[in-house]
Amino acid sequence: MRSYRLVLLTAAGIIIGIYVLFGIFLSILQSSMVYVPDDDKFGECEALIDAETIEFQGTRLYYTNNTEDLVIAYHSNTGSACDMPELIQLFKDLNVSYIFVEYNGYGVDGNIPSKDSILADVQNTIEFVENIEHHSVHVVGYSLGSALAAHHASHHYVDSMTLISPFTSIADIAKIKYWMYPVDIILSENYANTDCVREYEGRLLLIHSTSDHKVPFRMSEELYAMSPSADKELISMDNVEHGDMLKDNRTTESIKEFLSE
């Protein structure tokens, strides 16, 4: 009987130890799990060869001043600002002015990405836009960029906001896979769209795929339901994975129609 209890206690100790060690592992490596920059160096983007490269208060921007209408684009957690050729081409076709924001820790700047430094990039972008004259300002964010676009819109007036494959929060995504851990406590690199969307009352477009296996479509439904905007739309797509949203011309056509209204 004692040996049986000893075996149970030993097994329980091993399980608890593995649980704790893996939790520590997740906490330490969360930054590399959230941020996946590529090797594209800022200023060497062929798709943005016509854009002016600007460093404003430590934040790097690709800026093209074409018209009085300005669109600000925030990219996903993978790649770089150069990794959205479809949006770049769309803005060129619309003949609007545009800014593509490169995040701290991306674009081969030698830094390590963090929530604080990337949100500082958003604030610097807001201040940069305040120093230039445009008749209208619109923000577009994809995946992680949706949280940055929402942060921008909730801290400074914009005429419209477009969120592509947005999440309610990074913590909500993590809880799907790591449901057995107190994610809210462990996760320091958490971004939430919920509070920002609740504060934004302007024109809102949400685009999401029902086939998205990375960020569930229901998260856009939740954001749509909590939005106080009187002019909001949720466009659902099918048979498109999370990473392919910008490659599908239904996405760019929807944004084109929305920005042209």
Image (cartoon, grey):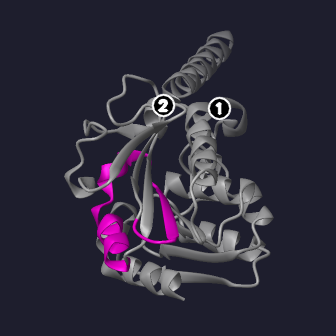
Magenta residue span: 66-94
Label 2, on which residue?
A: 113
- The mark total stands at 2
Identify the residue shown where x is 26% and y is 56%: 50
SS assignment at label 2: loop
Residue 5 vs residue 141, the one in the foreground: 141
Tell me the amino acid under the disc marked 2.
Pro
Residue 96 falls left or right of residue 188? left
Side of 48 relative to 214 (left or right): left
Assess whether residue 241 is covered by the magenta stretch: no
Residue 188 bears which disc, if any?
A: 1
Q: CA distance from mark 2 to mark 1?
A: 13 Å
Of circles 2 and 1, which is in front?
A: 2
Q: Is residue 249 above or below residue 97?
A: below
**Between 64 and 19, the one nearer to me in the picture:** 64
Answer few, some or many: residues within 10 Å of disc 1's Cα (few below 14, many 20 plus, some between 14 and 19): some
Identify which residue is drawn at 19% across, 52% down: 46
Q: Quadrant of residue 66?
A: bottom left
How packed mark 2 is, by other alpha carbons closer than 10 Å (few <14, some 14-19, many 20 or more), is many
Residue 182, x across and y down, in percent: 70, 36
Give whichever of 133, 227 is nearer the camera.
133
Please state which amino acid type lies under the numbered disc 1: Ser
Please determine whether, in this image, residue 40 is positioned above or below residue 69.
above
- Residue 1: x and y in percent read 68, 15
Describe the element under mark 1 as helix, strand or loop: loop
Q: Residue at x 47, y 33 (%)?
A: 104
Q: Residue at x 49, y 86 (%)?
A: 260
Give me the disc on residue 25. none
Residue 134 relative to residue 209: left or right: right
Q: Position of residue 107 (x, y in %)?
A: 34, 36
Membership of 87 in magenta stretch: yes
- In front of the other: 134 or 193: 134
